[in-house]
Image (spheres, coloured by chain):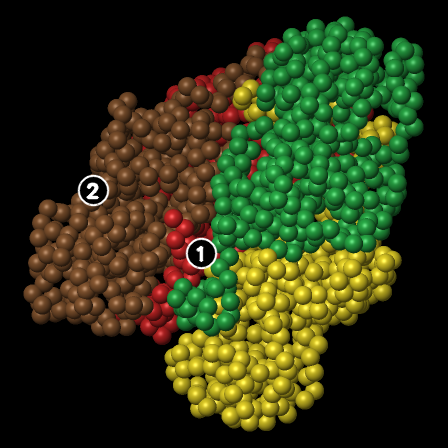
Chain colours: A yellow, B green, C red, D brown
């Protein structure tokens, strides 16, 4: 996609790695523009300290680093958990949740630094290009968008091409060994795709994972945790109130240790392809399980069933990149309304990759022990068993003799 | 619910246990009718050989035992798996799937043995009364329905009452110790509720479970299995074609050994209560996981998302007892249409309570490795990365500048 | 339903007609209680001035009349219009919207006048009993509910029985001729069911209708109206700002004159029966049509499609009596979020029973004439036709060669 | 979209009008290929007799005319009616239903005549390009697709450009006056958009319509019709069995005479634009109304509500061009299952633009007059009013005291 008009200054989503380093230089060369490098810290656990120097050495006029970790968990991860957003039954949306935040802040940086364009290093077959660009369009349609990998002028077709380009122009890149797959990481998860993973019959190699031990290598003793929620939002672990990023980090550490949260799946990308993805989402998995259990005693049945009909759609919107869309606001209003009463504590046990719910309690519980009991003494005042007769008879009226 | 008119001969769903033995006798006493005892073998693993003698000793004019195991798995469990039917995110519906079959066969037996009524021993607060009675109403509305626990004439209010009644009338019941919870079991699962489980903060006792080892006591070495599917239906394990009941039994054995399929939840009953249920569904859990993975490479994206919108509704219908309803036929037509291409094999690994998918393959796979690859050489003919530009631009058109 | 415990003072929903007059007296006789008569003015256009005297003459200790017309339209009718709530494709829910309001206020009156029970005159086969009683249960579960028509003690089985009872006890009832159908009326609509209408092949008699002329008798010249909306709420007619009740009254007058809003349908009651209902909803029909047209230029496509998936469910909840339910709050949050931008004006033409939209405009219109035009000069900057190629190609990727 | 490789013979969807005549010639000139002209008769009521000669005179090597009218109504219109498919509440999908059929047959003709490409004259902003091309991709992905209006080589930007091109090359085109809007017509409807209609506040001119009189000019006497259905499919009018195309033609004539079926709306195109469309669908409107009424007495409540949740999605798929998609097959399986019992007759009255249902009857009616009646004698055996007490109490259990 060539820009529709010449650009003067481009804000580039920059990681300091080979690809975005080459893109930084290529933008200057090919578009005759200035480049502002921009890096978001969403918990990817990479060294960010030397990044501005590296960006400038590569040609950037400026390099802006933003710590978005608390915002990421508070405003993106937690809403997804409240909405029980899981894509195609398994993917907890770690990357999909980070992209709109990264892109939103990129727009902010672009406007603050006088840029007239934004650029990213996502390829033309993936979901991330969509997530970046829909956010750009929604928040600042006046900015030109440059996606070098889809640019007809871009002629670097492989990693060796990029390395050669870097050497030719003296771009400082670490000579890291190429991994046999591509990877993304943030506070929510690490994801892997491509390369050796493209064969869906072949299991991933054991040494690929970075956030979790394998279940086999996890401790032999289970670990018990108590997660506290307020209106559907996680607020504490074992009684200790924690900020969003700290809470998720804490859970990542213990759940990762216990081998929790690995998923290996084939998913459907928005652009129409099937793709194999492997994920590790240790803390997020614990939160999803615990949140559902919290709802089980605090959420009305029909509210839950209504919300459950919205969840797959919510996940689809997040996956496809429509975080900043008007329909997302409608879904979020519904989800928020559903969480009014979701307050209390859930006890889970982590063991060898599993998360088992072992208890839930709440000051606003809708579970009524006296009512639930089969013991006859229970709640006869509230629940008269004879009522069931009329209930069943009218439920069955329209079925009667259909066969 | 007193019958609306006197009944002459009642077909009773009979297990030989305390409750239905007492009910058998009570029906004769209170309704002045004959009783045909009926027992379905759905894999509850109880001794059925002496049952007819016992029933007759208690007063039954006849006792009919039917082996429904293959039909249960083939026509009830497998459709639920094809439809990805999971109630409230966790319950795999083991009891809910068996009830309509048991009741359907009970109607058949009633008609064959000249009964004018049917009776069951389910209580007035649970789901099972609904499942029994909606099936009766749908299939044979001319039969009277007797539900002793809701009958105003029924004055046995506790287990000791029932034991006293049995002793008084010389009803042969085993002097088993009452378990501190109630239990149901069939080929799909074992379920537990009531009694000590009514406190949702208290974890179940370790010795309660009958189909699964605890994850802690499961083998230290993982087990790999390959499940084969045809049009969404499980057909083989490790290459061996098996009948439905045999296949599920096989999986129950190995998955139970590996601690797979325990669920502890609070659920919403159809009659309006919240209730705590604990389940073990070893083989069914493996099948649900493997089936979803089978779909991942053989099912079109939009078919999957459409089906995923129907699944919660399908689960709700099953849970609530509407198996034999016209709306169920509509949902099943949609689900069946969605499974046309779901054929192939999935490899899973069982370990310490977990089921991990490690591979999937299919002769009719929709996953296209050449297309999926980020490697530039791949499928340029089919997928032109430049197409993504127009795709994203039109997707974003309506979002543009909304903020 | 006999009350579970003796009641001392009952608040009865009272109209002054034969049925509720008899019930008033019957309550005193049979329950040995006091009765507070309560009447809500929801625009039924009946004489309310002598009602308190009549109630007291029948035995009531008090009679409370409440004018709920503005609240009815503002808080019940308008939310239904914003949510496009139409039951089974045709019924605009006039009665279903009024019942929860009437019952809510009845609870209020009951509590203010020291009642320990509430009673209504709805029969045991209809929807209204459910709407009354679910509201009572939701808002004041401590109040006993008395539904005489379902009471085993109630032995008046027909209108002559009631007239005889009234005569016996000197209850003042007008000797009106019984209509050959039953009717309900409020500011939103008039409805008819029962009696001669029970034959679904027979058209209603021409003289039945009270709010609308027949299309044949409507004026021969069309009438043009402009309806103004703010955030989805109707606010003005032909430029004149009107309170909710006045606005709807105004529209009822003109739309009734033009024969707008008659519906003749067979619907499915919540209790499991099919029932034939005839409705006239003149002003409400105009508002539904105009509101949809207002949305057409102000509502984002995907917001609309999301809302359209919720509308049938919203209508079902209203119809079934779940206005005061937690799931309704979730749906209303979603609907309200969808209406943020629904502001502007719609021009409609009324003629011989029809409502035709002839124009719509908005200061916040999302319709972009320059963009929409097929004229090539239009908006080339925003919409590049070449983008459609990539859009279509990726949309079609998963379909390719499926047959 | 330039073809990815040179093409030798193109099958062009050809109407004989200015645009497709120019395109025919332009394809030969610009692609150096042969052109097979193809015209489908879907009831557009244009003169087709001289078309082959005209096509050959313009340069075509062949011209194939196919009469698809019966197939159109039987396999496209009727399924939409069975599915109650209405886009955004108003549009009955006349054009959207015809495009996939036209394109399917075009693929057939292309393959039969040895073409390696297909072409159409739809522009780059509309829905029709998508409907054509998704069908091409689904049915014959090996065929190149040429869409001249989006082709960078295409430089005719206006009608005068096209006329000049035609004159330059001696292309035989009728010198018809350009209409101030664009129009499409088939057996289902006539549609209008663009030009003077682009102002959404301006009503269409009275002389635009071709299938319907205006309500004002319609007869002063109403007309009664009886439509017969079998399994949801229209089969007769006033007792006379008719083929699909004849039945729809018959209804078009009478309903058009009575001014039925005009719709004026702003709709959301798949490509992301809002667009104003005016439609006249006389017979189709009658069928939709009558079909819904037929369902009202023959379709189970929960089947209807389930289907009603699918209808908006069905309409969206049809509108967007996904007729030949696997998800459409899933929806159609569900819809077909819902129609099993939809058999009987509906009486409607046409008057001044309106269609009023005045009666419905069926040999398989689910409406039970004895059950529905409020008259106490009715069906006490089947419906015991006391049952409503238990029904309501359990429905209200979870609501109790929520406020």
Relative depth, front residue between D372 and B248: B248
- Quarter holding the C terminus of chain A is top right
- Is the residue marked by circle 2 packed among few (<14), some (14-19), or many (20+) residues within 10 Å? few
- C53 relative to D298 in the view: left or right: right
- Quarter holding the N terminus of chain A is bottom left
Q: Chain of mark 1?
A: C
Give the image location of residue B65, x and y in percent: 72, 18
Marks 2 and 1, how far apart at CA = 31 Å
Relative depth, front residue between C208 and B60: B60
Q: Residue at left 47%, top 73%?
A: B376
Q: Residue at left 48%, top 64%?
A: B370
Give the image location of residue D177, x and y in percent: 13, 59
The residue identified by callout 1 is C398
The residue identified by callout 2 is D67
Q: Mark 1 falls on what kind of element?
A: loop
Q: Give the mark toward the camera: 2 or 1.
A: 1
Give the image location of residue D52, x and y in percent: 11, 51
Quarter where residue D202 is shown:
bottom left
Relative depth, front residue between A259 and D356: A259
The outermost residue toward the front is B240
Q: Residue at left 9%, top 70%?
A: D168
């Amino acid at each position: 996609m060539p820009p529709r008009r010449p650009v003067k200054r481009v804000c580039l989503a920059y990681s300091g790695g080979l690809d975005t380093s080459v893109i930084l230089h290529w933008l200057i060369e090919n578009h005759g523009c200035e480049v502002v490098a921009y890096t978001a810290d969403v918990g990817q656990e990479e060294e960010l300290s030397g990044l501005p120097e590296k960006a400038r050495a590569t040609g950037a006029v400026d390099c802006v680093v933003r710590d978005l970790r608390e915002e990421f968990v508070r405003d993106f991860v937690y809403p997804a958990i409240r909405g029980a957003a899981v894509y195609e039954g398994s993917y907890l949306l770690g990357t999909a949740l980070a992209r709109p935040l990264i892109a939103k802040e990129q727009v902010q940086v672009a406007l603050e630094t006088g840029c007239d364009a934004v650029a990213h290093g996502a390829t033309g077959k993936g979901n991330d290009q969509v997530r970046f660009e829909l956010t750009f369009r929604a928040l600042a349609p006046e900015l030109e968008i440059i996606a070098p990998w889809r640019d007809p002028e871009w002629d670097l077709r492989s990693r060796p091409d990029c390395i050669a380009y870097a050497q030719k122009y003296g771009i400082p890149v670490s000579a890291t060994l190429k991994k046999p797959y591509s990877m993304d990481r943030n506070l929510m998860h690490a994801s892997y795709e491509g390369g050796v993973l493209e064969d869906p019959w072949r299991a991933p190699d054991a040494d690929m994972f970075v956030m979790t031990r394998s279940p086999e290598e996890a401790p032999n003793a289970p670990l018990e945790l108590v997660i506290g929620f307020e209106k559907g939002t996680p607020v504490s672990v074992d009684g200790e109130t924690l900020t969003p990023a700290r809470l998720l980090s804490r859970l990542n550490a213990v759940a990762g240790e216990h081998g929790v949260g690995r998923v290996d799946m084939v998913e459907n990308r928005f652009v129409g392809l099937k793709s194999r993805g492997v994920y590790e989402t240790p803390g997020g998995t614990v939160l999803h399980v615990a949140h559902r259990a919290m709802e089980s005693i605090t959420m009305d049945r029909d509210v839950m069933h209504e919300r459950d009909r919205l969840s797959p759609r919510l996940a689809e919107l997040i996956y496809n990149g429509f975080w900043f869309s008007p329909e997302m606001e409608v879904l979020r209003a519904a989800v928020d309304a559903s969480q009014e009463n979701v307050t209390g504590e859930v006890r889970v046990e982590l063991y060898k990759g599993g998360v088992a719910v072992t208890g839930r309690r709440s000051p606003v519980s809708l579970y009524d022990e006296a009512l639930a009991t089969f013991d006859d003494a229970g709640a006869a005042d509230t629940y008269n068993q004879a009522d069931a007769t009329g209930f069943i008879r009218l439920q069955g009226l329209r079925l009667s003799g259909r066969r």
